[in-house]
Image: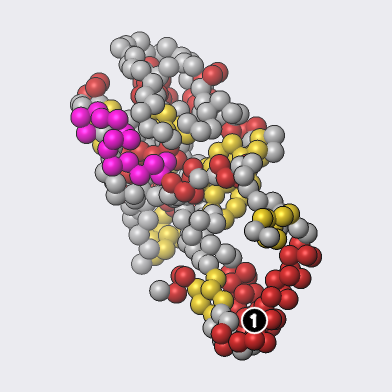
Amino acid sequence: MNSRVTINGINIIVKGEKTILAVCREAGIHIPTLCHDERLEPYGGCRLCLVEIKGTARPLAACTTPVQDGMEISTESETLTRLRRTTLSLILSNHPGDCMCCEKAGDCDLQELAYMYNIEPGEFAGEKWDLPVREDNPFITYEPNKCILCARCARICNEVVMAETIAITGRGFYAMPDTAFRKARSLENCEFCGQCVSACPTGALTDRKGRGRGRSLGMKKVKTTCSYCGTGCNFYLNVKDNRVVKVTSDYDAPVNKGNLCIKGRYGYDFIHSPDRIKTPLIKRDGVFHEATWDEALELTAKKFKELVEKHGPEKVGGFSSSRCTNEENYLLSKWVRCAIGSNNVDNCARV
Ligand code: FES
């Protein structure tokens, strides 16, 4: 069912059931958020996305409020700016001011919003966390002092990965995302997928492998497709000085929407491995020798020809891999059928 709403004086027709935030994003209207993540259920925790709705006593969170026919919504006003500034100042009152050397600087949602709303440090004074940095996970560094309790890490671990490794533990000032009984993450059932890192809006959770190897803004982002399985997840290789420093999510990827498994997010060391085979190898007298592609292809064609002549084409088959692209699988099929003359073609993804 369609509904008609007005946002900042603009008439918008909304198809189906959507939240105010979703409609605003589709219409290109910016609303600040910290706890919202497109991959998760609406949470309504940070209260930065407050909007005013005519006839409603107080501002409501755009991320959890569904649009209703006839709504008149304002996303900007003096009151909203004041509320957002207060919320950000309160968050920053218990946040280390080490932006200059923070791993996430330049790519931090909190830093960006503090800049946008011109927040002066120290507007509110109060107790601050002073907790040690945790490196009890081989892939993830956890700086609890930088946590803003948006719960995106715990929610993605529970709602998307379903590993249920982390939850918000403690209450009040002592609330904190953590494992059961604060055990090392690597000892719990962590899948090392780094989904929590991808969901964290601040520098609380960062990739250990990429730490200190360059600012996100200074890296070339190369969009690519994971080659570990046939799902076809997209992500960005972050490249600095011609070396892959880390992998970050592509939230617009049609297949995986920014989600990745351990292999996709952290399994990139092979790219620069000195053991990687870079030229074809031909075995002579039991020893591999480097060869040119022409030599290798000529030898392979000759051997196949001999096999087909000796045993017949039906004795030859091709088995391709879901790690290959569609085009490569198609070429293998074509080669077996046309060049060999056999219909023995299969793929590991078929079953
Ligand atoms: Fe709506 Fe946090 S984004 S409350």
Q: Residue at x 28, y 42 (%)?
A: 189
Q: Where in the figure is residue 97, as x and y percent of width and height?
A: 46, 16
Do we see residue 217 in this rendering? yes
Magenta segment boundaries in residue numbering = 180-194
- Above or below, comparing residue 315 to residue 281 in the picture: below
User: Could you say which quadrant of the image residue 123 lies in?
Assistant: top left
- Above or below, comparing residue 179 to residue 82 in the picture: below
Viewer-proximal residue among 74 and 250: 250
Q: Residue at x 47, y 34 (%)?
A: 207
**Residue 94 forms part of the magenta stretch:** no
The residue identified by callout 1 is 307
Q: Where in the figure is residue 125, as x and y percent of width and height?
A: 35, 10
Viewer-proximal residue among 71 and 124: 124
Q: In the displayed orientation, state which residue is furthest to the front.
A: 285
Question: In the image, what residue type sits under mark 1?
Answer: Leu
User: Could you say which quadrant of the image residue 333 lies in?
Assistant: bottom right
Q: Is mark 1 within 8 Å of ligand 1?
A: no
- Estimate how packed mark 1 is, as few (under 14), some (14 to 19) or many (20 or more) residues with alpha carbons within 10 Å: some
**Quadrant containing the C terminus in the rendered view:** bottom left
